[in-house]
Image (spheres, helix red, strand yellow):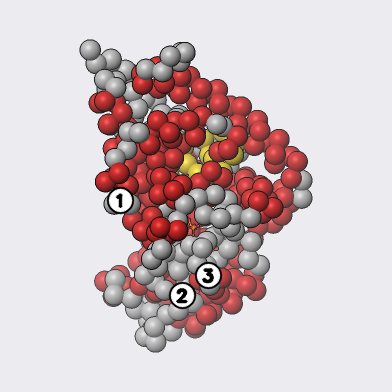
Amino acid sequence: MTEAIPAASPRVFSGVQPSGALHLGNYLGALVKFVALQHQMECLYCVVDLHAITAWQDPKQLAAQTREIAAAYFAAGVDPAKAIVFAQSAVPEHAELAWIFNCVARLGWLDRMIQFKEKSGKHKERSSVGLYTYPVLQAADILLYKATHVPVGEDQKQHLELTRDIAAKFNHDFDAEGFFPLTEALIEGPGARVMSLRDGLAKMSKSDPSDQSRINLTDDADAIAGKIRRAKTDPLPLSDSLEDLKARPEADNLVGIYAALSGETKAQVLATYGGQGFGQSFKPALADLLVERLSPVSAEMRRLLADPAEIDRTLAAGALRARAIAGPILAQTKAKVGFVGAA
Ligand code: AQP
């Protein structure tokens, strides 16, 4: 008989990989949402180091990068007394649930994942097996806490759909309707898809070989001004029509970044700067706005990173809180699968 389980109470889970310096896309697509949500629901924010090692990470760098992501969370405004902040590898239940989900997910589902195709490129046979099953681990991250909402950028939409497919198949196969929630992605928002400063059709990314393609959270005012000055645009002035932006991806991206940072709509930005050349006042104003928003974050990151032991203590305390939620959910999952000795 199908077991009736009450609707899950709202809970947020999200994570960022410690695979390099954070950029403006991570900040607007993820961190800004993390901060807002911690006041509305129970939130778990993870530094997903198990995900990071799906591509090579220098072991000497990985710990520093993990602390840097945690520092970025706190500097952006995540409060570790409110949200649960921890490193993924400190909660072994993630890997355990991922194995069970590896046996639930179908090969055909993973074959369709665009991010694997993009990241593995032409030489997929040389990619790690972990990169291929990355979305399954992501589903485990989320469902280990029965999270109902996941704030992410638009690039993660397909992985969230896979998480729902895995939850639905598990619930069906193990006769446990409603056991895992069908998690919703929280993608909407002005910074959901920040594009490269060198190519308006490619997303801003940590792994882009060109540092000029992104604004890093740790860039100083000169670096930000230089990158915005050199940001690719077209020779036409900025128009005052939203329709016109659709065919001009680089212009659209810069206007979108300005709107996301200022809290204005794109139409309001165009009402102020439309009709002028990019360099006249729009690009300098955008650089100033970026410096105004990001420099307090990078200053706070530097302050926090001066005391790595304190970051480690905060992450360890977060891992204990995370395990207190994860343990019983994993035990129930194992019992449903039929493992002897599970609670
Ligand atoms: N360009 C972006 N615009 C909006 N949101 C973005 N995110 C990433 N890039 C953009 C969001 O940031 C969160 C953390 O991402 P991640 O580091 O875990 O993985 P990612 O999506 O693979 O990020 P990168 O920067 O592109 O890293 P690499 O180059 O290593 O792959 C996620 O919520 C993501 O949606």
Task: Please state which of residues 263 and 307 is positioned toward the viewer in this rendering.
Answer: 307
Tag 2: residue type?
Answer: Arg
Question: What distance separates the C-alpha of mark 3 from that of mark 1?
Answer: 26 Å
* Rendered image: mark on residue 284: none
Q: Which residue is mark 1?
A: 111
Q: Where residue 270 appears, x then y in whole percent?
A: 38, 71
Task: Please state which of residues 21 and 331 is positioned toward the viewer in this rendering.
Answer: 331
The mark closer to the camera, 3 or 2, is 3
Q: Earlier in the sequence, mark 1 or mark 2?
A: 1
Residue 39 visible here? no
Q: Quadrant of residue 313?
A: top right
At numbered mark 2, what does the secondary structure look like: helix, strand or loop? loop
Q: Which residue is mark 3?
A: 209
Q: Earlier in the sequence, mark 3 or mark 2?
A: 2
At numbered mark 3, what does the secondary structure look like: helix, strand or loop? loop
Residue 267 visible here? yes
Q: Quadrant of residue 193?
A: bottom left
Q: Are marks 3 and 1 in contact (CB under 8 Å)?
A: no
Question: What distance separates the C-alpha of mark 3 from that of mark 2?
Answer: 11 Å
Q: Residue at x 53, y 70 (%)?
A: 209
Is residue 160 shown above or below 247? above
Left/right of residue 99 with respect to residue 73 in the rendered view: left
Q: Which residue is mark 2?
A: 198
Tag 3: residue type?
Answer: Pro
Q: Residues within 10 Å of mark 1 (few under 14, many from 20)?
A: few
Q: Where residue 252 appears, x then y in whole percent?
A: 37, 70
Q: Residue at x 39, y 74 (%)?
A: 251
